Image: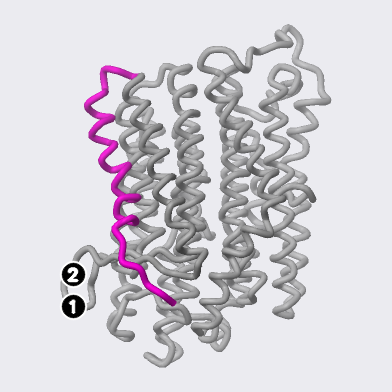
């Protein structure tokens, strides 16, 4: 594979970092402040997309920024796998930037400058994770992502926000320092390197028991992936404003979590070693439990954001389940589901925020007839919901189909059953919302119309319509997206 040395990954990471200074200087000029946010998002997207032709040509982009000590480099590598996360995050930051304008202004939120600064920093951290060439670089940006999103979770500064943001910090920093860092140190000790190499670096370096322990430490140390029992932080972080919820669930944080899980499984352990020790199968059962349990809990939540949060916990484990099956179709599906879930779930969170901004309603039990007041918003919600259920003509159908195919290839039909049962549970907690919105009457005394496309409200509705269109479009462009996924699978399987 041809390697090209380029600083483009550095520029892609740093553009939103430098934007924070421009945002800070424009604190007293909201229009200029938000313009810098949008401009930075567009430039970041442009830089990321400029690397795509190189990657599709089968080449890799690398850049070594700094050698801290022998074996510990801050280095970056852009390959087909990296591009899945980078394209997803950089694309969705653009629509989220516009959504934030409408949401923050319509509700007259305080501390908006700090909000936009931390939002930009989180995108720098997310792309740093995407382009990390080794575990050392990845860990630095993983911790950075936790720290710069903490002010977003605590944004309202209420007693509840302070309490839950503290738990957010304890869970994410605690697990990463106690478990993930220990696993990284052990990997360096036994393998002598922290490089991400297709096929893995741990095979033959230690006893089976030691490798199993390192595996458990890694999985426990990536709480951002939302695998039970390390998922508690995620629903509680819903105390943050809706744009932050969208960031946590779609653009950066949890996607970074599952991205890292996939990368560690394929580039640190390797398909052959995972299969030999039965670790892939064990993780598949853990992920299956998380999928079903989170779906059952979601059914019981009346708060819309809480239901969406537990839906996220389950949907993230679809990604983990798929890659754990270790078959080409399933690995490709895990990569695609990062994009599919991101576009689908951000649509749903945008919807929840638009409803709150227009009506101040938070509970599902309050949404009777909301489709008559906000038809465009609820149509978009329906699209996102049908995608996550896995209905044909929506993007989620493609990834669930490939997951099931991968389970059949692996000879584990039980996981086909998990996908079917969980999809039924998805329908059970999403479809009643759609039914209530469109087919139940408005509560007595409520005005039948809410102006969806007027004033700042339009800045919340238009982005969610765009992401809903993306969900449908992903279904039709899936064959082309699979080309990129297959490049990753070929390199990983070939490397192992």
Label 1: which residue? 70
Q: Distance between the residues labelled 2 and 1?
A: 7 Å
Residue 472: give x, y in percent of width and height.
Answer: 70, 43
Residue 140 left/right relative to 268 = left
Residue 461: give x, y in percent of width and height.
Answer: 59, 25
For residue 318: magenta? no
Res. 57 in view: yes
Q: Check the image and name the residue furthest to the right.
A: 439
Residue 40: give x, y in percent of width and height.
Answer: 36, 37
Residue 111 left/right relative to 475 = left
Image quarter where the N terminus lies is bottom left
Disc 2: CA contacts within 10 A as few (<14), some (14-19) or many (>=20): few
Disc 1: CA contacts within 10 A as few (<14), some (14-19) or many (>=20): few
Give me the residue at 46% from left, 51% from top.
49
Residue 394: give x, y in percent of width and height.
Answer: 73, 47
Give me the residue at 65% from left, 64% from top.
288
For residue 8: magenta? yes
Q: Check the image and name the residue furthest to the left.
A: 69
Q: What element carries label 1?
A: loop
- Figure check: 219 above or below 369: below
- Figure check: 306 above or below 494: above
Q: Is mark 2 on a helix, strand or loop?
A: strand
Label 2: which residue? 67
**Label 1 near label 2: C-beta < 8 Å?**
yes
* Count of marks overlaid on the render: 2
Picture quadrant of residue 158? top left
Residue 290 left/right relative to 495 = right
Q: What stretch is highlighted in magenta?
A: 1-30
Picture quadrant of residue 156? top left
Give me the residue at 34% from left, 19% from top.
30
* Magenta residues, dominant SS class: helix
């Amino acid at each position: 594979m041809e390697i090209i040395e380029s600083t483009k990954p550095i520029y892609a990471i740093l553009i939103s970092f430098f934007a924070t200074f421009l945002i800070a200087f424009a604190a007293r000029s909201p229009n200029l402040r938000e313009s810098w946010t949008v401009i930075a998002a567009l430039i970041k997207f442009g830089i990321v997309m400029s690397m795509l032709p190189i990657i599709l040509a089968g080449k890799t982009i690398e850049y070594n920024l700094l050698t801290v000590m022998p074996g510990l480099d801050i280095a970056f590598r852009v390959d087909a796998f990296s591009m899945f996360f980078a394209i997803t995050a950089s694309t969705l930051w653009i629509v989220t930037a516009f959504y934030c304008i409408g949401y923050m202004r319509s509700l007259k939120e305080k501390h908006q400058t700090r909000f936009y600064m931390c939002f930009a920093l989180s995108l720098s951290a997310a792309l740093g994770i995407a382009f990390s060439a080794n575990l050392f670089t990845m860990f630095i940006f993983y911790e950075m992502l936790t720290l710069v999103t903490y002010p977003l979770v605590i944004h309202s500064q209420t007693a509840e926000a302070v309490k839950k943001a503290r738990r957010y910090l304890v869970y994410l920093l605690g697990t990463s320092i106690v478990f993930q860092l220990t696993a990284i140190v052990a990997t360096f000790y036994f393998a002598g390197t922290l490089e991400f190499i297709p096929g893995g670096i741990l095979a033959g370096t230690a006893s089976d028991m030691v490798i199993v322990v390192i595996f458990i430490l890694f999985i426990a140390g990536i709480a951002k992936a939302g695998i039970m029992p390390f998922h508690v932080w995620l629903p509680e972080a819903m105390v943050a404003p809706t744009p932050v919820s969208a960031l946590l669930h779609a653009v950066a944080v949890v996607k970074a979590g599952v991205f890292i899980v996939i990368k560690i499984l394929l580039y640190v352990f390797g398909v052959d070693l995972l299969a030999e020790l039965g670790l892939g199968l064990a993780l598949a059962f853990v992920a299956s439990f998380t999928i079903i349990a989170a779906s059952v809990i979601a059914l019981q939540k009346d708060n819309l954001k809480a239901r969406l949060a537990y839906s996220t916990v389950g949907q993230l484990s679809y990604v983990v389940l798929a890659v754990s099956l270790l078959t080409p179709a399933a690995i490709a599906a895990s990569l695609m589901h990062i994009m599919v879930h991101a576009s689908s779930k951000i649509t749903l969170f945008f919807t929840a925020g638009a409803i709150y901004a227009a009506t101040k309603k938070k509970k599902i039990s309050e949404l009777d007839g909301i489709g008559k007041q906000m038809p465009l918003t609820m149509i978009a919600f329906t699209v996102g919901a049908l995608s996550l259920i896995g209905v044909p003509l929506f993007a989620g159908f493609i990834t669930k189909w490939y997951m099931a195919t991968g389970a059949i290839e692996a000879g584990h039909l039980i996981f086909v059953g998990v996908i079917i049962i969980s999809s039924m549970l998805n329908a059970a907690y999403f479809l009643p919302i759609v039914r209530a919105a469109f087919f139940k009457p408005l509560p007595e005394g409520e005005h039948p119309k809410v102006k969806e496309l007027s004033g700042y409200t339009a800045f919340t509705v238009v982005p969610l319509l765009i992401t809903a269109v993306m969900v449908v479009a992903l279904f039709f462009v899936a064959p082309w997206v699979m080309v990129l996924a297959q490049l990753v699978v070929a390199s990983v399987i070939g490397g192992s």
